[in-house]
Image (tube, helix red, strand yellow):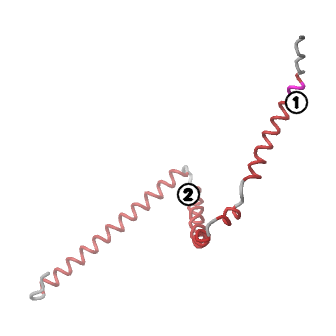
Amino acid sequence: MPPKPSPSRWAIWAKMLIGGGIICVGGPALVYWVTPTEEELFLKYNPELQKRSLENRIGRQQDFDDFVTRLKQHSKSNKPIWEAVAEAEQKARDGKIAEQAKLIEETRARKDEIRKHQSLVPGGSL
């Protein structure tokens, strides 16, 4: 039996280009065709989940808007964004710590004031 003639270079290149085109175009097209839309997913929800999702939608949108606003503010600085975010978080933590310290000091002052008043009142011990 004589050996089979090998295909020409052009035939190999044509097969390769056609196969690559099918994979590069057909793959994403298939994914796009198979992936459900947000509305289709929402309609497949349980009615209770649909109701809860609609109730929480406004809050989630507000959270996202706040996040984007903070991101825009952090991006205005000359520092990398992760450093700007870290500084903002540190300032927020320091503010909370100072606020808690102030509350503790106010409660101590109130307790001391109550003790002073009770020591002045005859028979006013706790």
Relative side of 65 to 113, left or right:
right
Q: Residue at x 51, y 54 (%)?
A: 84
Considering only vertical position in the picture, is 31 above or below 96? above
Q: Position of residue 16 (x, y in %)?
A: 83, 30
Q: Which corner quadrant of the image does residue 51 belong to?
A: bottom right
Mark on residue 74?
2
Q: Magenta region's main secondary structure?
A: helix
Alpha carbon of mark 2 to alpha carbon of mark 1: how far?
52 Å
Relative side of 102 to 76, left or right:
left
Q: Position of residue 99 (x, y in %)?
A: 36, 68
Mark on residue 14?
1
Residue type at mark 1 is Ala
Q: Give 27 or 4, whichever is nearer the viewer.
A: 4
In the rendered structure, which disc, 2 or 1, sits on the residue that comes first in sequence? Answer: 1
> What are the residue bounds of the magenta stretch?
10-14
Q: Secondary structure at mark 2?
A: helix
Q: Residue at x 74, y 52 (%)?
A: 34
Relative side of 106 to 45, left or right:
left
Mark 2 or mark 1, whichever is nearer to me: 1
Q: Position of residue 19 (x, y in %)?
A: 82, 34
Residue 16 shown in magenta:
no
Q: Quadrant of the N terminus?
A: top right
Q: Which corner quadrant of the image does residue 65 belong to?
A: bottom right
Q: Secondary structure at mark 1?
A: helix
Q: Residue at x 24, y 78 (%)?
A: 110
Residue placed farthest to the left in the image?
123
Residue placed farthest to the bottom in the image?
122
Considering only vertical position in the picture, is 30 above or below 96? above
